Image: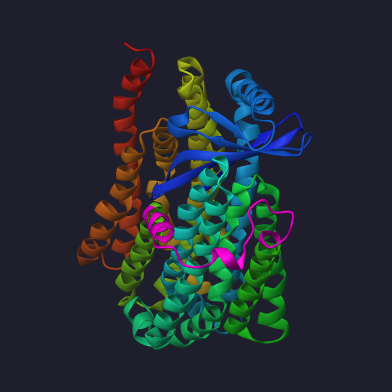
Amino acid sequence: MGALDWLFDFTGTGVAAIFSVPTGFGAEYPILGALWNTKSQKEHFVIAPVFRLKFVTLHEVIRESRHMNNLYEERLGTDRMLPLVFRMALPAVAAQIVNLLYNIVDRIYIGHIPGIGTDALAGIGVTSSVIILISAFSSIVGAGGAPLAAIALGQGDRERAGKILGNGLVLLLLFTVLTSATAYLSMHPLLMAIGASEHTIGYAMDYLSVYLLGTLFVEVSVGLNTFINTQGRPGIAMCSVIIGALLNIGLDPLFIFVFGMGVKGAALATILSQACSAWWVLHFLTSRKATLRIERRYMRPDRRIIGATLALGVSPFIMASTESLVGFVLNSGLKVYGDIYISALAIMQSAMLAVSVPLTGFAQGFIPIVSYNYGHVNRERVKDCFKIVVRVMFSFNLLLVLFMILFPGLVASAFTSDERLIATVEHTLPVFLAGMTIFGLQRACQNMFVALGQAKVSVFIALLRKVILLVPLALLLPRWMGGMGVYAAEGVSDAAAAVCCTLIFVWQFPKILRKMAGQ
């Protein structure tokens, strides 16, 4: 889902989607999209290099595409900015929140398992680096293949689009075998290396061994979902996420507590939920309702198509892989201080997600507005949008983070009833989230760079925070601060990156506006 920005036609005539390719660490560059008009029942593929929109319809080329272009321009170029931003952003925020629940619900239930919750939570926290890396392979196909397929459809080359989808499925099957076999064969030493201890390794292995049985479901549901969006069916694509998330929320307590399966039950609930999501995706992509369908004749490996998919998908893969690296560094750094610190980290990372995920959704909503008006050289609307965005994102982020810092016990209580773990979170969370108080500035400025076509700057800022600052600080600060140094590394890197990003934006934004005016 990370490679899709949703736009909604607010007159009720249709649903639009702006497709973007992640360039790394949250930086996304809008490339193309698809628009479905519910009145004419026609699919319109939108090719948007550099934010200049060119509509290419599959039916009634001239008349319908001009009509849709006018509707699009009316919404993004003339609507009142404040209502427009919120109408665009709220659906994406809702989608991101649903996805957030998918990510943290296991931790909430596992942390409340009587007697073992704290150690089990630490074990699950350790496995997150492996799971993130496994999921990263699906982004190669999702963010690499789907844009290529959409371009082929826009050009009227359905055979090539079918081959891209078919080869994408083949790649996902290969990734499943590769990641599952590697993880199974090296599970114990791998988990011990990234932070597991004698007390938590059993829970980590229990969870991961069951989770790996559903690797194929993860790869398919995530990797092929964007091919549904490519066909102008974001609602159907969204259903796959909602189905999985709601099912996981319902099955977790059933398997963990009612059936007494503990950590294994949480993993089983997850893979069954992902299996349903995968079935939903495959059912649509093999049905007559799909414009682009999975067909056996298109699954013969094509080196050129596979190469193009890998080339375009390598950036989001690197992004997710680096997230896995960060998790490895933090967990391994805390291992020497005790399992309870890793359990606390798992809780605080979930709290951080609760802040950053809605911001991601909000960014997905405003980026198309800025990009469209930038392409149409409308400086005032670009500035107006930024003013709204920076105020909303900064205020929301600040209020939520301050609440967590002031009431860390409430945050911890959502994940555990262990008084010792709650006390640890109360002591460390203010340090861990201190830099997040101004994180909204970074997200606003960083995503403005993306919307204005400055993707390289956005990638640098993300690299600055995660790789250049966080990883070295997490290795150095514990020498003077002990375990607290690992948590402080997050706070310092967040604050430093936010300040640097804001300064760069203040320096570059006026230049971009002057360039728009041709000065």
Tell me how many marks there are.
0
| Front position in the image: 273 or 333 | 273
| Relative horizontal placement of residue 16, taking residue 13 as reference (left or right) | left
| Front position in the image: 436 or 297 | 297
- State the residue at coordinates (35%, 81%): 190
The magenta stretch is 284-311
- State the residue at coordinates (75%, 29%): 11
Q: Is residue 290 magenta?
A: yes
Q: Is residue 298 above or below residue 442?
A: below
**Would residue 49 be visible to someone looking at this image?**
yes
**The image quarter in which residue 29 lies:** top left
Q: Quadrant of the C terminus?
A: top left
Q: Is residue 232 above or below residue 454?
A: below
| Relative horizontal placement of residue 195, taking residue 162 as reference (left or right) | left
Residue located farthest toward the top when viewing the structure as drawn: 519
Q: Position of residue 257 (x, y in %)?
A: 69, 81
Q: Is residue 294 above or below residue 71?
A: below
Q: Is residue 106 magenta?
A: no
| Front position in the image: 100 or 65 | 65
Residue located farthest toward the right when viewing the structure as drawn: 39
**The image quarter in which residue 487 lies:** bottom left
What is the basis of the colouring in this image? rainbow
Q: Position of residue 459 (x, y in %)?
A: 34, 44
